Image: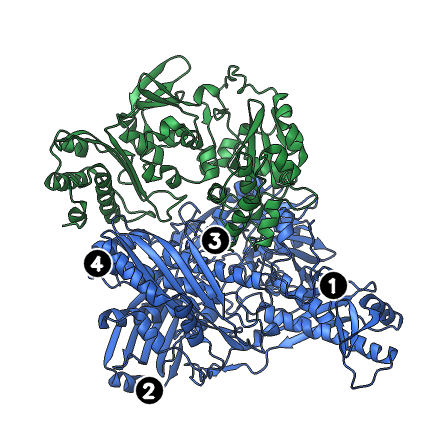
Chain colours: A green, B blue
Amino acid sequence: MIEFYLNERKIRTDAPPGAGLLGFIRKEQGLKGAKLVCQEGECAACAVLVGALKGDSVQYRSMCSCIMPLANAQGRHVVTIEGINGAELTPVQQAIADCHGSQCGFCTPGFVVSLTGTLLGGRRPGYGQLRQAIDGNICRCTGYKSIERAAQRIAEELPAADYGLEALIREGYLPAYFRDMAARLAAIADPTRQGLPEEETASAAPLFLGGGTDLLVQAPRKVQHSAVQPVFNQPALKGVREEGGRCIIGAAATATDLQESELFQSVLNPADGFFHLLSSTPIRNMSTVGGNLINASPIGDFTILFLALDSDVRLQDGRRERTLPLKDFYLDYKKMDRRPEERLAAIEFDMPKKSLCFSFEKVSARRNLDIASVNTAALLEIGGDGAIRTAHLSAGGVGPIPMYLRRTAAFLKGELLDEELLKAALAAMQEEIAPISDARGSAEYKRLLLRQLVLAHFQKAAAGRVDVGSLALPG
Amino acid sequence: MNKKATPTTRPFSGNLDAASHTRGQSLYLDDIPEYAGTLYARAFSSPVAHGRIRSLDCEAAARAEGVVRIFTWRDIPGENQVGNIVPDEPLLAEEEAHYIGQPIALAVAETAEAAEAAARQIRADIEELPAVTDAREAFRRGQLLAGSRRFEMGDVEAAFAQCKYIFEGTAHTGGQEHVYLEPQGAYALPREGKVFIHSSTQGPTQVQRAAARVLGVPMNQVEVDVTRIGGGFGGKEDQASPWAAMVALAAYILKKPVKYILSRHEDLLMTGKRHPYDSDYRIGLDEGLNILAYEATFYQNGGAAADLSPAVLERTLFHATNSYYVPNARLTAHCCRTNIAPSTAFRGFGGPQGMFVIEAAIHHAARSLKVDAADIQQKNLLEDGHVFPYGQVVRDSEARRCWMENIKRNDIAALRDEVRQYNASHQFSKKGLHLMPVCFGISFTNTMMNHARALVHVYSDGSVGISTGAVEMGQGANTKMVQVAAREFGLRLEQVRIETTNTTRVANTSPSAASATSDLNGKALQDACGQVRERLFGLVREALGLSREDTIGLRDNTVRVNGEEQDMSWQQLIQLAFSRRINLSAKGHYATPEIHFDKTTEKGHPFAYHVYGTAALLCTVDCLRGIYSFDAAHIVHDFGSSMNEGVDLGQVEGGLAQGMGWMTMEDLQHSPEGRLLSRTLSNYKIPDLYSVPAEVTVHFLGSEGSERAIYKSKTTGEPPLMYGIGAYFALYGAILAFNPEAPRLYHAPMTPERVLGLLYGEKMRGNAG
């Protein structure tokens, strides 16, 4: 039995927990505003807001309902466009209509939902945040400029003095029932929120289900008909924390959780724009770190990042827990050192010292919300004497597994950094990788691209010490 | 609902559907409430690109739970044929399969899931035959879908002999997936022996014709209705027909409602896309950079069936010289049959493919002569009195005005200096700037399609209902139609209701395509309204005792005589007319005058008018990583006298983005075996918010417009897409600033892979040419 609010109505359903939320909304509930377009989280025409009780208020996130498992709605407030509509157009809707931000209209409800969700964060969003909120919404008609103009107008018109839920209701951005949602959610018994022990599934090797961003794309029918064990909302698997110099991240932490974690952000190089290269707002709200690792994609962005941070993974089977280095976790294409009953609990790594430079690089056909042709990360420490004290290097898209470039890293470590060394290391790296030609690029391209991106790491870590320009040109 | 009163004096700007769109209350095919007992269909399609079907095993599928019936070609009561121009496309494959994704059988079941499962259980024993995916290879093998065409003007060989500079080379443009957000689909209902079809189509009559043919019934036994569609871009012109014919077949035989909405995966796999082209060019210039001669040969990849390919091919030839005067031209085009899904209409309809080649030729010449491409472009722009290679004389050319206005308004000379300085001071970041002029002919190139009808009813309370053949797909056709009726009757927009596009109200329509929708349907509607108005004016003349010299008008809901408001409202006039038994309905008709084309001589006057414009595109390339972004697009566009600036601006901005997508990131890939590699939206990327230029400006060129355009408001649908071609050459410019020795490569799209290859001169896959 799954219990949640859909707009103003309480829903109790026996529908399969692994079924997609969009099908439930459209077919079972007859709400036709959210559209089915891609069934893979690529367009957000199906966007809904999912509100969770945080203290005495509700925190809303936009999600793609086409790949969101119904199970993850448990205890939540799911808002579709119908739940935003009032008697009049809301100012968000009015801005889109007036700025000609809607042509064929099929994507439009998704844009309205995403933009409206941004208003609910407690603080008054500016144009930049509003624009970012629609980074996962695809429109094929307008070319986006009219929608940007609408976002600008929304930013200008938002109430300023007493910004908050009440002001938004008063000004017609939201229907009045939003006021009651915190109390209503509090009345739903939510085992995950109260930290009750999770229900044990009968299956010895259950299908652990996170945000759905991979499983509901790859095998929606299978998930729908399987005994699933939802982990997305398990408190024990959430969170980012520091313990004794180690950063520990729960497997069910979402990309957004990491993005909002000051601790985790302190690891990253802000100039890399890591989270901007990582999918889109609704997908970041759904995708879990654990899912990214367990998916075992050779180009998983988090996997590549954690490999360079020399991370360890914690696996649990309900009785025992074991820890192993991430770089030993991947055995072959989509094969891991994991027994079926084992679940990824957390990933952890030593917080890098301030003297270390962390760098992440990714190139894809489209700059944003795309799968990498090649991605790579590096953790480098170069001493005042030019000696490379630390060298961790990872690369995706250049082999059957996400690669920790052991030999290249070993080649560099302890050596004195100069052009000759780097040149030799780059040559050694070409021996270590084995890219194949596929839809994301030819093998030759991936080789050249990785070389360029590793140079970009050194440009950041050792500007002034090596002349990257002279090395960039091959041969 | 916020319904703002719209004055009749000021032109309306925007889309009347916008309010219901933002509320998610606009109805699309899959939002129409289903009848109880509705069945669901799913096609089983060919897993091989070319093969002989030895046998088909539907046993297990037919016995599966919830399955009602499996249909094959043997169940078709009429003709197994959906080909429009050429009858070469069976609805369900019989003995041979010609592309991966070609429908072979149709599973119909009680739920969509059961139909999907059933389709998966169908087995075909297919003897594989060699597949061809390359147009040039198909041509070598003599695989043609239709006769080759040649447009010729002047004496090309003699002119080349006069040329000081001659350059030749090859070019390639890739296909493009439409990614209309609403997938293909149809819902058929049996109705007392006839079939009613809800279809997501740009061509209701086309669907009607195809379904009637398959059922073996006259067209009056099939009714097609379209409320609106969630994007079309040409992809639902002819290719909406198969799905509609399939559900019609099942509904007709099973006497039950049957629905089929393609999943995105099926849609990508099974439907045709923009034609890839391989081309050869030879361009000749004199000392003063005047283009004296141009020769081009186009190998069009038409896919496995003709579909609209012969018409697309023709438009390639019409636009092969873009905005330039070429006194001596020889343009040849071949419609090649390959083993990919039948290529089809896509915004621009072959025009963009033709234009890319001459832009490549000019770029080639400019680079070799060490001049700016703009020097050659500007020198050769079309002027009145020039003749197109197809014989039409240029009238009211706005080519030079658009160009000059752009370089003046945007101070292109200063921008060039900035680019030069930036490039001199940045080692790994380079900028590129390119100007792209566009000239696009308006009309269906098949003259017989340039006609339309419209129906108007004035109800006895004064409210107005209109029906036309136009299909609303985001281009604002419905809004423009409402504007026409409101203007003709002097009413507010709210007083006019536009009905669904339905084949029983308006018959024998041309599809909403060729940018001709608002002109053809608008003028037919103008005619219909005019008929009713003339009857009303006769009545006013009589009732007020007016003489022949008095002029009557309708404005702001009031009758006017000689400009003076009368004490007679629109409602009073209508009540009076109704009581006098005056016909308050009319059917209007319009057929574009003057146009003609003779395919035997390949000469004529095929276009009602031309649309002009110039775009300036500015980009920045990260020369370490081979990635790029677009800083700006500045456009000067000839809208004539725009009747709806909001809609028209949206067409320009949207067309630009779509054209840039085609030129930069939309990389349609097939394996040599004919398998579509880019078959999900996670590996076929269309522009997102960040892909479009940071700044887009659109200047409305003040121009007279054309009498052939509704209210002289030139149509905007297709032309802006071709501004996107400038993106390729802007990127190339930045690349050459980094690597002046970069190979010559006119192979779109300019993906990050091709950019890096050009920056570093690497010989990489797919870059030959």
Amino acid type for the residue under numbered disc 1: Gly
C-alpha gap between disc 4 and disc 2: 39 Å
Q: Circle 2 sits in a helix, a strand or a loop, which is it? A: loop
Whether label 4 touches label 2, CB < 8 Å: no
Sooner in the amino-acid sequence: mark 3 or mark 4? 3
Q: Which amino acid, by three-letter code, is at mark 3?
A: Met
Res B655 label: none
Q: The residue marked by circle 3 belongs to what chain?
A: B
Single out the mark in the foreground, 4 or 1: 4
Label 1 – label 2 distance at C-alpha: 56 Å
Look at mark 4 in the image and give the residue it sits on. Answer: B739
Mark 1 — residue? B465
Looking at the image, tell me whether mark 1 or mark 2 is earlier in sequence order. Answer: 2
Instruction: Please state if A443 lies on the left or on the right of A291 as rendered.
Output: left
What distance separates the C-alpha of mark 4 from that of mark 1?
62 Å
Q: What chain does mark 1 sit on?
A: B
From the image, tell me which residue sits under label 3.
B270
Labelled disc at residue B155: 2
User: Circle 3 sits in a helix, a strand or a loop, which is it?
Assistant: helix
Q: Are marks 3 and 4 on the same chain?
A: yes
Is the residue marked by circle 1 packed among few (<14), some (14-19), or many (20+) residues within 10 Å? some
| Circle 3/circle 2 CB separation < 8 Å | no
Q: Which residue is more in the foreground, B713 or B310?
A: B713
Q: Is residue A160 left or right of residue B146?
A: right
The amino acid type found where label 2 is placed reads: Asp
For label 1, the SS is: strand
Query: Which quadrant is the N terminus of chain A positioned in?
Result: top right
Of B150 and B195, the residue lying toward us = B150
Residue A43 x %, y %:
49, 45
